[in-house]
Image: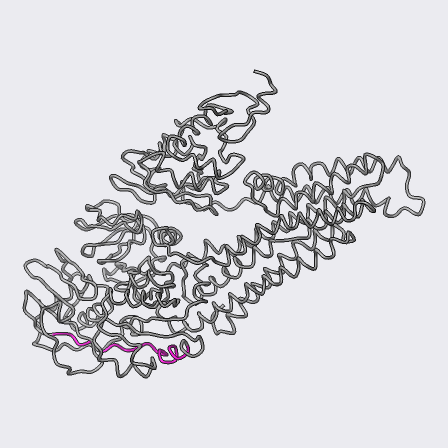
Amino acid sequence: MSADLLTKTTCAHCGDTCDEELIKSREHSFCCHGCKTVFELLEDSGLSGYYEMEENRPGISMRRSKKSQHFSHLDDPAVMHKLLDYQDEKQARVTLNIPQIHCSSCIYLLENLHKIEPAVRTAEVFFDRREVAVHFNIEELPLSKLAALLSSIGYEPDFSLNHLSGKQERSNNRPLLLKIGIAGFAFGNIMLFSLPEYLAGPGGIDQQFLRLFGGLNIILALPVFLYSSLDFFRPALASMRQRQWRMDIAISLGIIAMFTRSLYEILSGYGVGYMDSFTMLVFFLLAGRLFQQKTYESLSFERDFKAYFPLSVIRINAQGEEESVAANRLETDDTIVIRNGELIPADSVLLDDGGSFDYSFVTGESEPVKIRKGELVYAGGRNVKTSARFRTIKPVSSSYLTRLWNSEAFRKPRPESLYSASARFSRYFSPGVIAIALLAAAYWLPGEPGLAINAFTAVLIIACPCALALSAPFTLGWATKVLGKNRVYLKNAGVTEQFAVVDSIVFDKTGTLTHRDESEIQFRGRNLEAQEQRLILSALHENTHPLGRAVYTELKKSYPGFSSERIIKPDAYREAAGNGIEAVIGEHTIRAGSASWIGVEEQADTSARASRMYISIDGLVPGYFEISSRYRDGIGQLVSGLRDSIGSDVYLLSGDNDKEKEHLTPVFGDAGRLRFNQSPHDKLAFVEELKKDHREVLMIGDGLNDAGALRSSTVGISLAEDTSSFTPASDVIMEAGSLKLLDRVLAYSKSAKKIIYISFFISVLYNIVGLSYAVTGTLSPLICAIIMPLSSASVILFTTTATHWAAWRKGLRT
């Protein structure tokens, strides 16, 4: 076959030229057997749409693909334990680093992996981290075969030593620093060679020296053009192949224009060129890129703020007593107690006789998994049986729990954010800049070719969408950090935008407006025997509802000689949301909850403003606990601030009776905004009713009985107070002590949105002023190269200063 034909034929999979061999199959041409195999595999799996997403073929070349045998070590149990996020007998979940992910086609292919291999259940791509989380049937598809499958379609996972050891690999700036060093070295030396010309008198310097210095300048500038500039050329080429207009295209055209113009002048003897300006241009552009990269790393909005994940857990201390500690304080080999409904915060070994765990948080499947004593329980599982003891074998990974919190299963539909709006604007920015550059060059070219090239280059370099693109991420990122310092933890930075549009606020009462551990509790009924107290304590030990915890805490104080060892583990336990609990302990059945749950009529009102928990032991009702909860400090001021300063409608939903109505009406301003005897379904229906009226709803609850309402609301806040029972349906976890800051948080979010708009205006103004000077051809490209990174720096400085100043003005901790 002729070399001509090989050269002109491109591969149907990867788009590369078939310059080594030409393989025909199904009326298509391929550069190697690997590309042919992948093409046929995708076509047979119904994924041919992958090739329709880009004109120039999105596939990755398979010429250098590795054999699958080198993945066999991944089936070693020790290696699997380090890599897998979750595993049971049939299924597993793993998060893999895929460096080859580069475009929307990659996301399309990887998230449709189940069509190629049915053993893959789901795959979710995290584009910014170049990672894919795969949920798969490990019985049918061992980890080694999953890796081989990904490798066979051009996405070989990166199993680095740091990954296996659990260490975080630090970003490597060495190549960028090397490029900056080369550009700086060339710039400095070219400036030295140019000094004779700059210092020469009216007669200039000898042509022989001029040619010598010109040749040396070319030699020094070539590495800058061929190596240092690659950080602009490669993204530009990738953008063109993906038919996307990014700013790297405009910058690359500017670099090429300046270098080729200088090369022409030196070689033709027409002039001395601008190699000093060219090398300094690249130097400053790279330095600006390093500055942005270092700034992102120091802030680490998408990683580090999640380290505040505010779970708490019960730990058995050295004296054998239970104590509540922050989950991030857990260490390997700590003994912890996980009650019914609570989350396992770290990989642990079960110490008690069997249990059952719901891994829907991890796998999306709610069918409980039975675990025997001594077996491993993975982080993210929820205990659905009686409380059990565990020994932790790994420290808590806040970033892993937060990634589960942000998984697709719990994601809400959102309107277009300022993130996506700025990205869309930046997409149209580049072609507009190139059009302006061409028009400026065309205007000056007939009379002054030098001025035309200068104008063309200056326009391409000074125009900067980076400032536009940085406005939203930096403002929202800083806002997220500020809120985190005030113990308000957001699922992601975009929640700040949702805060800013809220116009209706719905409070749960018990455990939200009231303290969970500061209640006056009285038992009304006959005297309880010691064994009855022990049975009630053992049943309530499993419960995480605020009223149940309050009664448990009070009852154990009055129990003679109480210790954790006195707790009897129930043989069976269940909770009915909004009603109560039932525990079977030996031959006894204990129920605690509402009158209807126990099966008795509500007693006459003998104590205003008190909730009741009725008790039944083996069908007999010895009496009920009367709980008078203390409201959190500043609730009246908070509701007033939300209603008057923020302009929101404020509502209260409570599962309790209406004994508090008279007391709460003055606080909320209208009895019509108070609803009592609300079941979890009623709360959900109320939120849905508000949304039908086009209201943006903020729901604040305890995360236990309010999961449906939290998920349905625009923003759901789960209030955290000494418990690991929160719902992934919430968007925010707020520590209980920060509830009084809610009005300030909402006001601050509105300020953050204004800051984004102001920074947008600053960016647009900079580009208008800069371009108006650049098109005249009088602005040196070197000055443009200095000004461009300064524009990004100014936006970063403005957003940083403005977000902290706004927080200080709102009375938030910075």
- The residue drawn where x is 39% and y is 45% is 124
> Residue 94, can we see it?
no
Q: Is residue 637 magenta?
A: yes
**In the displayed structure, would residue 14 be above or below residue 488?**
above
Q: Residue at x 45, y 35 (%)?
A: 155
Q: Is residue 583 above or below residue 63?
A: below
In percent of width and height, residue 186 lies at 73, 41
Q: Nearer the viewer, residue 633 or 327?
A: 633
The x and y percentages for residue 87 are: 29, 42
Q: Write the residue at 52% across / 27% down.
A: 11
* Lateral position of residue 298 relative to residue 576, left or right: right
Nearer to the camera, 220 or 365: 365
The answer to whether 571 appears left or right of 467 in the picture is left
Image quadrant in which the N terminus is located: top right
Residue range in magenta is 624-641
- Residue 330: x and y in percent read 33, 56
Is residue 135 in view from this perspective?
yes
